[in-house]
Image (cartoon, rainbow, N blue to C red):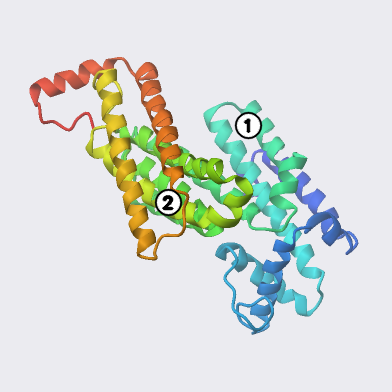
Amino acid sequence: MNFLKRFPPFEILLITVIAGIHLYAAFSDAYNFPNSWFTRDDAYYYFKVAQNITEGHGITFDGINLTNGYHPLWMLVCIPVFALARFDLILPLRVMLLIMAGFNAATAILIYRLVKNNLSQAVAMLAASFWAFNFYIHNNVYEFGLETPLAAFAIVLFIYKLSQIEKDWRKQPVTPKQLMTLAGIATLVMFSRLDLVFLAIIGGAWIILRGKPIRFLLPLDIVIIFLSMTTSVALRTGIPVYNSLFAAATVQAVIVALVVKIIALYFLGAYQHPRGDSVSKTLLQTGLALTISAVILTGLYLLLAQLGIGRDFPRSAFIIDLGLSTFLILALRLAGYWFGNKQIKSKVMRIKKRNPFSPASL
């Protein structure tokens, strides 16, 4: 009973409704599982590999050839569940459905608490209910049997912990325990879906750079650089060709672009507060940094391709990326100037007068 007192009535009601719906589905006829729930063949790739692992055949789908085509954390969830397949082939599917219900309820509760702490209880109840019972979300996140329930839970948990630290650090120092907890959750995020490593990087930068202007600019720059490069390749090649031929090469180009562009932006002064200098100087520094980084990026990637490290890549995409990323990053600096704190400029100027070499604006 003491355990239940930790949960508000709305959370208990939410858990009860979600559990009831999924229990009804879990004990339904066997034909419902392939027809209504686990309708993607990718799910059965996980399930069969997990079954083979439990039966001592190794990490294989066919029992012969090794495979690595899965996200590791969801496979770890599947392995003990599909040990039950030796008793009944449908039993693991019933258990898996209940596990996904648990992730659904946990994610909805985290959304409720996150929104409640930052907005209001009424909005929080609406947000949590929408997540838990929206058919589109349920179909795409929970019904396929893929890693998405775990990934969604990890993302929301990560954002929830970030929001707690965001409130705490202004009142008191962040403790090592808080940082270790956040690092553990970031690891959970990365291993739930390996492409979520970018979210972990952004979250880490957000904590490390707290109290500095770069903290707000860098995460958005990372998003812009990622979207700009992928969009540029897709515009150049078309979505089908991009997905079939250039997706892996684009990931390489994005990683190189992140390193080169962020370093150039930093050392050319584009990470000071947008109100720390005149608009023209800020735009000039930013545009120069992006132009120089585009030249370095193109040359470096071509060199990697010649060495056999880089993959084939449409070179004209670098030109499209230069125009797109420059427009978006300049727009971000202008937005920071227009909506930023107007007292920042006078404060920075006072510091510079006392110490012309001060990095206070960085």
In the drawing, what numbered circle is on residue 124? 1
- In the figure, is residue 160 to the left or right of 135? left
In the drawing, what numbered circle is on residue 72? none
- In the figure, is residue 11 to the left or right of 294? right
Q: Position of residue 286 (x, y in %)?
A: 30, 30
Q: Amino acid at mark 2?
A: Ala
Asked which secondary structure carries label 2, the reply is helix
- Is the residue 63 above or below the residue 278 in the image? below
Identity of the residue drawn at 39% across and 64% down: 309
Identity of the residue drawn at 26% across and 29% down: 285
Earlier sequence position, callout 2 versus callout 1: 1
Decide if residue 293 is in sight here: yes
Q: Position of residue 150 (x, y in %)?
A: 61, 55
Quadrant, the C terminus? top left
Q: Amino acid at mark 1?
A: Ala
Decide if residue 188 is in sight here: no
Q: Position of residue 99 (x, y in %)?
A: 70, 58
Estimate how packed mark 1 is, as few (under 14), some (14 to 19) or many (20 or more) residues with alpha carbons within 10 Å. many
- In the figure, is residue 338 to the left or right of 346? right
Estimate how packed mark 2 is, as few (under 14), some (14 to 19) or many (20 or more) residues with alpha carbons within 10 Å. many
Viewer-side residue, 152 vs 182: 152
In the drawing, what numbered circle is on residue 253? 2
